[in-house]
Image (cartoon, grey):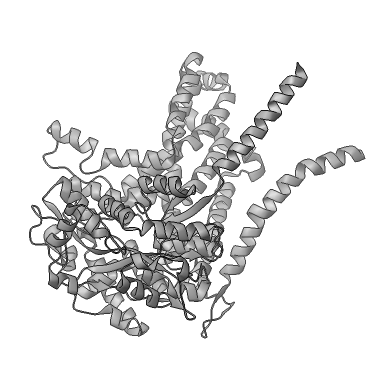
Amino acid sequence: MAKKSIGLFITIIIGFSFLSTAVWAETLELLTWKGYAPTVLVDKFKAETGIEVKVTFTNNEEMIAKLRATRGAGFDLAQPSQDRISSVQAEYKIYQPIDFSKINGDQIITTMLDAVKKNTTVDGVAHAVPFCWGTDGLVVNKKLAPAAADYTDLLNPAYKGRVSYRLKRPTLIALAFATGNDPFAKYSDPVAYKALMEKIGQEMIDKKDLVQNYWTNGDALLQSMRANEIYVAMAWDNGGWKLHEENPDIDFVAPKSGAMGWIDTFAIPAKAKNTEAAYKWINFMLKPENAAVFTNLEKTGTASKGAIQLADAKVKAHFERCFSDADINNIKWYPPVPDKLEAMEGMILDKVKASK
Amino acid sequence: MNKGMRWGLLIFILPVLVWLLLLIVLPQVDMAVMAIRADNEWGEKGFSLANFRVFFSEPIYWRTFARTAVFSVLVTFLTFLITMPVAFYITKVVSSRFQGFLTVLTLLPFWVSELVRVYGWMILLRESGVINHFLIKSGILNKPVELLYNDATMVMGLVYTSMLFMLVPLLSVLENLDNNLIEAAYDLGGNVWSITTKIIIPYCLPGIVSGSIVVFMLTLGNYLTPNLMGGKNGLWFTEQIYNQFIASFNWNQGSAFGFLLLILSSAIIWIGLKLTHQSLGKVVQ
């Protein structure tokens, strides 16, 4: 009897270990933004390839810090913005070059692929493939703040206590554009850039009492806008469009001085374990029918050729409503960030947060 | 001690030593090395005290540092003021049948994570939140007010978060306080004030000090509550360490700040122990 139960026990243990190896057979550790790996697509990918995608949500800064801490280990694929790759790569070597023979280039919009290749080239090789793109601009409650049209309205006393933005570099850059400067042209001149940013920082300190709160979490910001606690916010276009579908009064506004255009990419960390799965996921996500699913859910355009024709007409309508041809031509695309600018911007932003 | 026992001791103590070395000593050494290195004029890393110099030359850093220290002391004191009567009530006033029940009630909120508790407070206090809704419906206010994002709310959140860690040591010392002492003091003509200050507090001092140390350390090292409830004005020193590591990619500066925080907390605790004439060994028992 005792022998029998021991036998049973061992069988169960062996059974479990087989089961667990079957379950954990192949995984893809994905470090990405919230919403970039919708459950529908993760399930579909598993059905097609048998690979389980394990997702960790984060943002640009934490992505870099996480990969830097492990020197590029722990994740098979990351999704940094294209402007945050080259200087980080040059200094910390956290990504590996992309093997473009494994990428299905036919399904990617050529101009976007070329731009990202060019901007992420370090030591002669490119380190990223474009995934999706969007803009940063204003999300406005048009009933309560009908006149808000540019970033300067973030500092407009008319909206006292009803304004929100992030204490991050895009805010500094946007406000610099709105005050008639071109911060990107000053990227190569750190002294002039610093002087400009300090001026913008001082402006933000002077107008601090207008701010309801500096947002850090996109969902929390949308909640505050729904509750009419905030009238004008600097935020991503897709957030504005999500709110527009719930409440037509709220919409994204492409600012007069230009929406800030970003492209998020796929980049493979230096010590990725399962690069094959990473390439499979890249090709899978950029397949037009899958990219369209993502676009419908997140209201974010992708680099996938033809995906927009497959997406809901509603998403296209959002884009056409908010962007005239002039607005599109006025989008300010982020060039690669030079080394050391971030530390200086961080100091200015700290001062804004610490001020009374 | 015979040989067998010594081996036994070694086997049992080894995991502890390995744990201490790998997870506490080595990272600290790494941080210390990082803190005293900085870029020189040619962009190469070398020995330098520049990271510490930045702290003293930039007012925002040492001001945040001082602010964090002052607020942590304040929070510790307020936590003590609020928990002391609660602990006294649970151990001395209420009948023993309810003691366990009341203790569990005070523990209950701590079964969920700090993040959830802070979001709970935010739902209550926000402009479109529960409290404002109630105040407007009852006609006390005619327009909602923003209750979040100021120092008072932040202090309240911190006190709430750390109450349990003061309550538990207080309960255990009060448990041992002989009720006859209080009775005798009344017989000898003592009043509430003199009994509290001359009998209860001196008796509870080890518990108060150990609770205060825990609360102080937790508050000083807190990140979530000041960040979420303090909002635009709630800069805490931990957040500046985070910013150095994450936003500015300046790990050397962040390490230096981390060390300064460690020195600060050790110094304040040392002063606290000296003022109350307690020894660390006795307090942590």
The residue lying at 20 percent from left, 52 percent from top is A312
Relative to A261, residue A145 above or below: above
Relative to B104, residue B28 above or below: below
Coordinates of residue A42 in the picture (x, y in percent):
41, 48
Coordinates of residue B19 in the picture (x, y in percent):
68, 49
The residue lying at 47 percent from left, 51 percent from top is B220
| Total count of labels | 0
| Image position of A351 (left or right of A154) | right
Q: In which quarter of the image is the N terminus of chain B?
A: top right
The residue lying at 64 percent from left, 62 percent from top is B29
Coordinates of residue A317 in the picture (x, y in percent):
14, 57
Coordinates of residue A79 in the picture (x, y in percent):
41, 61
Quadrant of residue A291 in the image? bottom left
| Image position of A334 (left or right of B190) | left
Quadrant of residue A115 in the image? bottom left
Quadrant of residue A351 in the image? bottom left
In front here: A268 or A225?
A268
- The residue furthest right is B2
Relative to B85, residue B152 above or below: below
In front here: A345 or A261?
A261
The residue lying at 46 percent from left, 72 percent from top is A88
Relative to A340, residue B106 above or below: above
Q: Quadrant of the C terminus of chain B?
A: top right
Tell me if I can see residue B258 in this picture. Answer: yes
Tell me if I can see residue B190 in this picture. Answer: no
In front here: B75 or B202?
B75
| Image position of B142 (left or right of A74) | left
